[in-house]
Image (spheres, rainbow, N blue to C red):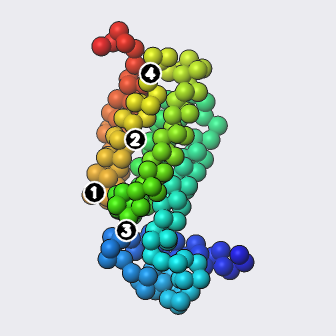
Amino acid sequence: MTKRGQATRRSLVKAAEEVFGEFSYERASVSEITRRAGVAQGTFYVYFPDKKSVFIELVHHLNEILRRTIATAIGDATDRMEMESIGLRTFFEFIHEHTALYQVMREAQFVDPETYAWHYETLAKGYEEGLKAAMASGQLSSELDSESAVDALLGMTEFVGWKYGVERGGTPTEQQFEHMLGFISRGLMYQAEDL
């Protein structure tokens, strides 16, 4: 694909993010996507066979940029709790800038269940690898069930991201952020005798 073709495809995916986020999958139209991308409607079909295919690509695109954004923000940090703090803050900032992510991901469960499962499994896999590395280095409790921890952490951040990023159009306050981080810190240092 030429550079111009790549740019056109990116424009269509970006426009799709806006349109699906604003109208939902069922009400979104190819004509509105192409109008916002600034291309003729026929151009859409050069890159995508139908509306569902651009929706699936959008899920993959959002997943990739979310993971890349957090990985870049964490950078050279080696302390797990510092990574959690930076990663959590970056996630909320990302959601504030990409509120359509929630609309798209919630609908993906019904539009294409396999893509929906892939999205969360991909996030969980990378997160769990990071926790296991921290457990192996002694930064986190060796008694931690990394899979359960990831499920709880993703569940919490998704709900909070929806509440503040989508419903309220912002991010948690600094005090709320610190409370969540404290909750995460205590959970990740889990010891059986604490129960």
What is the x, y in percent for residue 54? 49, 71
Residue type at the position of mark 3: Gly
**Crowdedness near tag 1: few (<14), some (14–19) or many (≥20) residues, C-alpha within 10 Å:** few
CB under 8 Å between discs 2 and 3:
no
Q: In the image, is residue 26 above or below residue 176?
A: below
Pointer 1 residue: 168
What is the x, y in percent for residue 6? 65, 74
How far apart are the two marked residues, 2 and 1, measured between alpha carbons? 20 Å
* Number of numbered discs overlaid on the protein picture: 4
Secondary element type, mark 4:
loop
Q: Which numbered dot is residue 87?
A: none
Q: Which numbered dot is residue 144?
A: 4
First reached walking from the N terminus: tag 3 or tag 1: 3
First reached walking from the N terminus: tag 2 or tag 4: 4
Pointer 2 residue: 154
Residue type at the position of mark 1: Arg
| Residue 51 quadrant | bottom left
How far apart are the two marked residues, 2 and 3, measured between alpha carbons? 21 Å
Q: Which numbered dot is residue 21?
A: 3
Q: Residue at x 59, y 83 (%)?
A: 46
Residue type at the position of mark 4: Leu
How far apart are the two marked residues, 4 and 3, measured between alpha carbons? 37 Å
